[in-house]
């Protein structure tokens, strides 16, 4: 004798009404919810920043440079971009970076996608510096002048030049950092940091932060998936926001507890401030000698650095 299992009608129906009945059209359950949208975007952004880009494993100009010379040259270019005093110097650095990116087989669209948020945020935050307040007559240097409730706002050539220069400087520095991250695996980057004369505790904390961010990102995705798998009726947007805020507070609290437990476990096992996995430089027998491409990259970086200082 066989037993037949009868499934409820609501489980067989893919559409729900706003009251949760299995007859109407769904409002919010079938579409992308607030939680899915926020977590999906955050996971994609953080995943792209934390995980190594496929371009780091292809054969190219930047990838053929040793991790330590690559990092040193990038730091020199960052200093050059920070002290550059003219658009000519900044555009020269951009030209060098685009040349390197082209022969490193880095897609221009990927590069622009990575740096565009920083450019937008910088331009938005510094936009008030464009305007000057006044009640007098218009100056000949004003490019734009308008009045709101009796208060005059003007945009002068000096303010516009300063704003464009600041945005350009930030763009150059973000472009330098992004090119390094796109062409370097995270393991090679931490090993290069470990080879530099930096405090071991600093590199260790940086490495542990990176590992914990990956774990935290996975935990958030699992919480969202569990919530979605246990939801039958379409929740209201206000309820979703309240639930999401409570989960964020819970994740922060659990992260603090986990950090304390990990620290106590490491100290009890004789932790001396140095993490060997992924942070320590390669053994001396396995290190490759300075090659011509390394010397060329370092020479170019030093040349740009001193040219910017002398300009």
Image (cartoon, grey):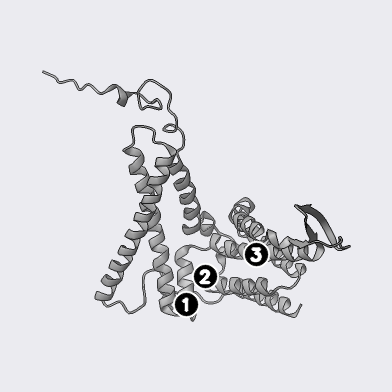
Residue drawn at x 33%, y 43% is: 226
Q: Secondary structure at mark 3?
A: helix
Residue drawn at x 76%, y 70% is: 86
Extreme residue in the front direction: 150
Mark 2: give few (<14), some (14-19) or many (20+) Cα within 10 Å: many
What residue did someone put label 1 on? 195
**Mark 1 vs mark 2, CA separation in Å:** 10 Å
What residue did someone put label 2 on? 67
Q: Earlier in the sequence, mark 1 or mark 2?
A: 2
Q: Earlier in the sequence, mark 3 or mark 1?
A: 3
Residue drawn at x 40%, y 46% is: 242
CB under 8 Å between discs 3 and 1: no
Q: Secondary structure at mark 1?
A: helix
Residue 260 makes an appearance in the image? yes
Q: Earlier in the sequence, mark 2 or mark 3?
A: 2
Left or right of 208: which side holds 185? right
> Residue 260 versus residue 133: which sits nearer the camera?
133
> Residue 175 versus residue 155: which sits nearer the camera?
155
Extreme residue in the left direction: 1
Q: Is residue 6 above or below residue 74?
A: above
Residue 262: percent from the left, percent from the top? 30, 67
Q: Is residue 129 above or below residue 233?
A: below
Residue 65: percent from the left, percent from the top? 56, 69
What residue did someone put label 3 on? 170
Q: Tell us which disc is closer to us: 2 or 3.
A: 3
Left or right of 184: which side holds 222? left
CB under 8 Å between discs 1 and 2: yes
């Amino acid at each position: 004798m066989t037993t037949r299992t009868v499934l409820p009608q609501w489980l067989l129906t893919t559409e729900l009404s706003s009251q949760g009945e299995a007859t109407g059209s769904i409002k919010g359950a079938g579409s992308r919810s607030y939680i899915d949208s926020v977590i999906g975007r955050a996971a994609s952004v953080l995943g792209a920043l934390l995980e190594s880009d496929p371009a780091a494993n292809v054969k190219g100009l930047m990838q053929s440079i040793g991790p330590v010379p690559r990092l040193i040259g990038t730091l020199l270019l960052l200093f050059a971009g920070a002290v550059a005093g003219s658009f000519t110097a900044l555009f020269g650095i951009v030209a060098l970076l685009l040349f390197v990116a082209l022969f490193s087989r880095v897609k221009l669209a990927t590069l622009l996608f990575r740096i565009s948020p920083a450019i937008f945020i910088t331009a938005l935050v510094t936009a008030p510096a464009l305007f000057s307040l006044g009640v007098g007559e218009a100056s000949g240097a004003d490019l734009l002048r308008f009045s709101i409730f009796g208060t005059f706002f003007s945009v002068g050539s000096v303010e516009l030049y300063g704003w464009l220069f600041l945005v350009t400087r930030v763009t150059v520095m973000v472009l330098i950092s992004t090119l390094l991250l796109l062409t370097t695996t995270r393991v090679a980057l931490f090993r290069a940091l470990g080879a530099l004369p930096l405090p071991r505790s600093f590199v260790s904390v940086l490495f542990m932060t990176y590992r914990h961010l990956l774990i935290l990102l996975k935990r958030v995705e699992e919480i969202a998936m569990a919530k979605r798998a246990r939801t039958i009726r379409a929740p209201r947007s206000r309820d979703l926001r309240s639930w999401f805020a409570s989960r964020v507070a819970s994740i922060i609290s659990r992260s603090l507890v986990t950090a304390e437990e990990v620290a106590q476990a490491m100290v009890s096992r004789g932790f001396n401030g140095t993490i060997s996995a992924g942070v320590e430089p390669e053994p001396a027998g396995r290190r490759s000698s300075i090659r011509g491409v390394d010397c060329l990259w370092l020479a170019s970086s030093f040349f740009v650095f001193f040219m910017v200082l002398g300009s």
